[in-house]
Amino acid sequence: MTKIYYVQDLDFFEAPGGAEQTDRVYFKEGLKRGHDLNLITPHSPLGVEKDDLVILSNIRAYERSKILGIPCRTVTFTHDTWCAYRLYLPLTEKCFTDCPEYPFWNKVYENAELNIFLSPLHYEIHKERFGESVEPHFLTPSGFDDVDRFVDMKNGRSGVCNLNGLLGFKGREQLFKYAGEHPEVAMDIGGSNMEGDKRLDVDLPPNIRYVGPIQSSELPKFYNKYEFYVELHDRPQPYNRTIVESYLSGCKLIVNSLVGATSWPWFTDRDSVRAHLKSAPSEFWVKLEKELNL
């Protein structure tokens, strides 16, 4: 049996982020299917042998020479773009012509037996930059521990909500602009008000209210209070699970074309979305088993 190492910046059994939840769901599915899976974080030795398989998830915390020196087959399953500054700057023309990150990531994709992306949009922006280096590829959506907790509770709804929109890389300026253009709209923003270790100090438009952090267990109730969920980004989003959570919880969406989740052709109705999310983890492993003879 092939020994499979899952390489991630964070321990996804402890970290609460969306990328970590996706990795956790797919990792557990692999265990259920009988695979010999092992998690490696920067605190673990990267001790692999030539007959092993390494799945590269988020890997910014690793020395690049160690990643490029992996002696066995690799698969990429990154949840970001290649850009080291994606949290602060939208992609520009220079990103596609003179990017210092390009040589490393091009080699990572080129070396991989398979490159996995979270949405058609996620793949398209990589294909535009890296060309044939990202082939062969396939797509799989973000994983959910329990997608059925996000349902329409048939409560009375009003207003507009957003999660984490106070963060600059989550579309803050676009949200504020939308609020200014629609003064009749009352918008509540929940989630984090921290960037790094600094508390944000921003002046809110008069029709926006910050309602504080929302615990994961409270998200379905939060979404069900509102008629609309809004996210308006200025840079491509690989997936954006909050879009899916709010949609399955009954919200109408106000989004632009930079959201990976809505670029899926099956993002047409809630039943379709729910069905595809439930089948995705097993389809992920079926694909790997077939393509890599696992």
Image (cartoon, helix red, strand yellow):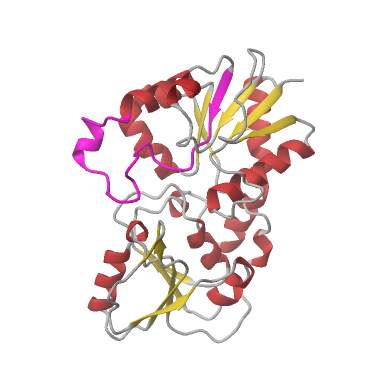
The quadrant of the picture occupied by the C terminus is top right
Left or right: residue 249 versus residue 174 is: right
The correct choice, above or below, for 83 with respect to 271 in the image is above
**Left or right of 203 on screen, residue 210:** right
The structure residue drawn at horizontal position 55% and vertical position 46%, both measured from the top left corner, is: 141
Instruction: Out of 209 and 151, give the one closest to the viewer.
Output: 209
Q: Is residue 89 above or below residue 162?
A: above
- Residue 94, placed above or below residue 179: above
Residue for point 35% across, 53% down:
258
Where is residue 253 shown, x and y percent of the image?
43, 68
Which quadrant holds residue 203?
bottom left
Total numbered circles: 0
> Is residue 218 inside the magenta stretch?
no
Dominant SS of magenta comes to: loop
Residue 250 rendering spot, x and y as whole percentages: 55, 72
With 157 as the anchor, is 200 left or right in this view? left
Assess whether residue 81 is covered by the magenta stretch. Answer: yes
The magenta region covers: 73-101
Quarter of the figure with the N terminus: top right
Depth check: give the residue in front, 44 or 215: 44
> Residue 106: where, in percent of width, then height?
37, 24
- Residue ID at (31%, 51%): 235
* Residue occupying the point 49% across, 22% down: 66
Percent across and percent down for residue 181 are 23, 77
Left or right of residue 211: residue 186: left
